[in-house]
Image (cartoon, rainbow, N blue to C red):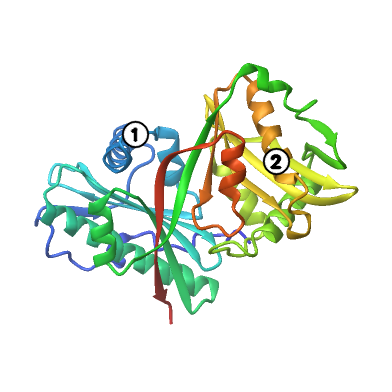
């Protein structure tokens, strides 16, 4: 369930001891989501982080605001220099039971010693938050899950030194969409072929069914953690690209066997979730859902559809995506650290 109050500690000084390696006049605090200059600075830090890690920036203010807007499932910290300028930013997200996401961004213009000191502050704070969240959830161990671009050597070095291990590789894939692909299916709202019906999810009963299908489909996936419907819905609605008419169900007869949830990225659509229950795999369900989201994007005048795939997935999902026109845009990694709570 979504907690009545945040499980996080709001005061970073309660979790971080005096960081001796930082310059003496630098401070630790929280970002101000109501201060446009603060949000712009964090956006600039994040975009520089992306450019250094993969070659180009992609994030905007809306994505930063999702992290810093004071939602109960997220908390933030910043390290500021003597002028008050944010030089490092950390964000944690109480994602699901046993899994806490961690955004770790350090100014790319800092020298190695000062940058590493900032990194250590972010990690110490995140470890403290992991204990807070884990204790509130009644866990013995809380996982911290953070990411890095595959070529970001600085990030790899600092995470490894802080006790994180690289555990998985992910392919971030994209395919172009052309206007004629609106005809890939009869109607993205509902179509039927070879006994499979794909239709838009309509109302809370359908949304719950989408969640149930995805929870079932992901049981055998890497690092799958149970997530309640309330948590799932709350988190998806935080995304500025969330649209109710981007949820689809696939059925065989009256049995739900697949689901896809996409978001609106402006120029394109992004497949946030796609899953098929094990008993229905090999029946063309996933392909039908993907053709639907492509046709929907084309009908809306969008130019691309993106998604993420586990490079080590035993299901061979990447072959399906490549067969439908997706190519790798860039590669990321998951880095994990397990924090004892008790």
Q: Is residue 162 above or below residue 313?
A: below
Q: Mark 1: which secondary structure?
A: loop
Residue drawn at (64%, 49%), measured in percent from left and top? 233
Coordinates of residue 262 in the picture (x, y in percent)? 62, 38
Out of 6 and 224, give the one closest to the viewer: 224
User: What residue does disc 1 label?
Assistant: 57
21 to 38, vertically: above or below: below
The answer to whether residue 271 is visible is no
Residue under the image location 59 percent in, 61 percent down:
221
Q: The N terminus lies in which quarter of the figure? A: bottom right
Of marks 2 and 1, the one in the foreground: 2
Q: Which residue is mark 2?
A: 287
Image point (88%, 42%), residue name? 195
> Residue sitting at 11 percent across and 56 percent down?
113
Question: Which callout, 2 or 1, points at the residue further toward the start of the chain?
Answer: 1
Q: Residue 272's x, y, as percent?
A: 58, 44
Q: Is residue 277 above or below residue 178?
A: below
State left or right for residue 76 relative to residue 224.
left
In front of the other: 8 or 242: 242
Few, some or many residues within 10 Å of mark 2 (<14, 14–19, 20+):
some
Q: Residue furthest right?
A: 253
Above or below for 266 versus 152: above
């Amino acid at each position: 369930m979504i907690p009545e109050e945040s499980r996080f500690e709001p005061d970073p000084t309660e979790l971080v001891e005096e960081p001796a390696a930082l310059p003496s006049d630098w401070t630790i605090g929280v970002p101000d989501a109501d201060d446009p200059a603060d949000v712009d600075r964090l956006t600039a830090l994040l975009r520089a982080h992306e450019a250094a890690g993969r070659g180009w920036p992609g994030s905007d203010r809306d994505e930063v605001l999702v992290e810093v807007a004071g939602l109960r499932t997220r908390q933030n910290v910043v390290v500021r220099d003597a002028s008050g300028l944010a030089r490092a930013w950390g964000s944690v997200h109480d994602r699901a039971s046993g899994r806490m996401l961690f955004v770790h961004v350090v100014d790319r213009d800092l020298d190695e010693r000062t940058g590493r000191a900032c990194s250590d502050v972010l990690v110490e704070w995140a470890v403290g938050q992991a204990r807070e969240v884990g204790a509130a959830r009644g866990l013995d161990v809380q996982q911290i899950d953070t990411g890095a671009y595959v070529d970001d050597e600085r990030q790899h070095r600092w995470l490894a030194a802080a006790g994180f291990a690289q555990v998985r590789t992910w392919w971030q894939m994209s395919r172009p969409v052309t206007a004629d692909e609106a005809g890939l299916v009869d109607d993205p709202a509902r179509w039927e072929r070879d006994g499979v019906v794909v239709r838009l999810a309509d109302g809370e009963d359908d949304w719950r069914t989408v969640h149930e299908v995805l929870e079932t489909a992901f049981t055998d996936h890497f690092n799958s953690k149970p997530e309640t419907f309330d948590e799932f819905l709350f988190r998806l609605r935080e995304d500025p690209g969330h649209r109710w008419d981007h949820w689809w169900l696939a059925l065989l007869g009256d049995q739900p066997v697949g689901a896809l949830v996409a978001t609106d990225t402006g120029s394109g659509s992004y497949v946030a979730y796609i899953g098929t229950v094990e008993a229905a795999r090999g029946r063309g369900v996933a392909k039908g859902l993907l053709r639907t989201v492509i046709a929907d994007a084309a009908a809306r005048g969008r130019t691309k559809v993106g998604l993420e795939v586990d490079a080590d997935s035993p299901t061979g999902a990447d072959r399906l995506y490549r067969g439908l026109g997706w190519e790798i845009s860039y590669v990321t990694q998951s880095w994990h650290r397990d924090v004892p709570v008790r």
